[in-house]
Amino acid sequence: MTDHSSASPGPTADGMPMLGLGTWKNTDPEQCAESVRTAVEMGYRHVDTAQHYHNEAAVGEGLASADVDRDDVFLATKVWTDSLAAEDVRETTQESLERLGVDYLDLLYVHWPADTYDPEETLAAFDDLYADGVIDRVGVSNFTPAHLDTARELLDAPIFANQVEMHPLFQQRALRDVAAEIGIQLVAYSPLSHGQVFDVPELTAVAEKHDVSEAQVSLAWLREKGVTAIPKATGGAHLRDNLDSLALSLDAADVERIDGIDREERFIHPDYAPASW
């Protein structure tokens, strides 16, 4: 693995900044480019996108326009489920590089283990990209423990991260245990549960105690669990609020209170998740 990154603010997980910028549904090109530029110049050093978000070109424009070296930004994208045949993986990854305006990726994910995903064929292509230095790390997304077992058996490269939905209302306890046991990072998408965290009494109580937002509490709780979060934000105020979560330290009582939230509310995007998943 080539160590391209030379700087990142806040805590990192094996070189990956534990707070990143998510870009799902940020599809207006001008707004997306501006929000990425603003975030990076504000201090974000981890940007997450995907082929299926249809915004890689705008993300690349935002990165290029920011007054920060590309090598200082941890950049991740994902291969969509219709492109997981070996040749399609290689071809579409090259297209992603061109849209993003970069010559390598810090992390490339299998977006879902569905549709054209064939573990032997798909993962062999990821191994090739890793061996060629096109990607620094191999990732998977929406993988269950069984999916992880199969992938680990087939890959030569280590699995660096599994990106899944996780937040205080969907705490992924079993998957966190598996990830810790096998030594892979968890990356939480939808870490604010699409705004639902603002209406959870336990989170509000902790937020009032520290004079911060429920969003900051949720992001700090994920970090306490060793999980990287990639909240989406476009406006400067929300970008700053999320970034300020890096300064929040939760005490044991805070963590215990959030751990005790007795809700399991998962949001799977009905217009987004592959039908065969």
Image (tube, rainbow, N blue to C red):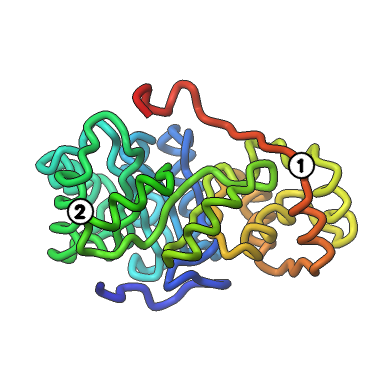
Q: Secondary structure at mark 1?
A: loop
Please, is residue 118 above or below residue 145 in the view? above
Residue 67 visible, this orientation: no
Q: Amino acid at mark 2?
A: Phe
Q: Residue at 42% of width from left, 63% of height from top?
A: 184
Q: Earlier in the sequence, mark 2 or mark 1?
A: 2
User: Pointer 2: residues within 10 angstroms few (<14), some, or many (20+)?
Assistant: many
Please, is residue 114 above or below residue 165 in the view? above
Checking the image for residue 126, the label placed there is 2
Q: Where in the figure is residue 96, as x and y percent of width and height?
A: 24, 46
Q: Which residue is mark 1?
A: 262
Q: Where in the figure is residue 229, as x and y percent of width and height?
A: 55, 55
Residue 264 visible, this orientation: yes
Instruction: Please state which of residues 122 and 182 is positioned toward the viewer in this rendering.
Output: 182
Q: Residue at 10% of width from left, 42% of height from top?
A: 87
Q: Residue at 80% of width from left, 68% of height from top?
A: 252
Q: Amino acid at mark 1?
A: Asp
Q: Quadrant of residue 210?
A: bottom right
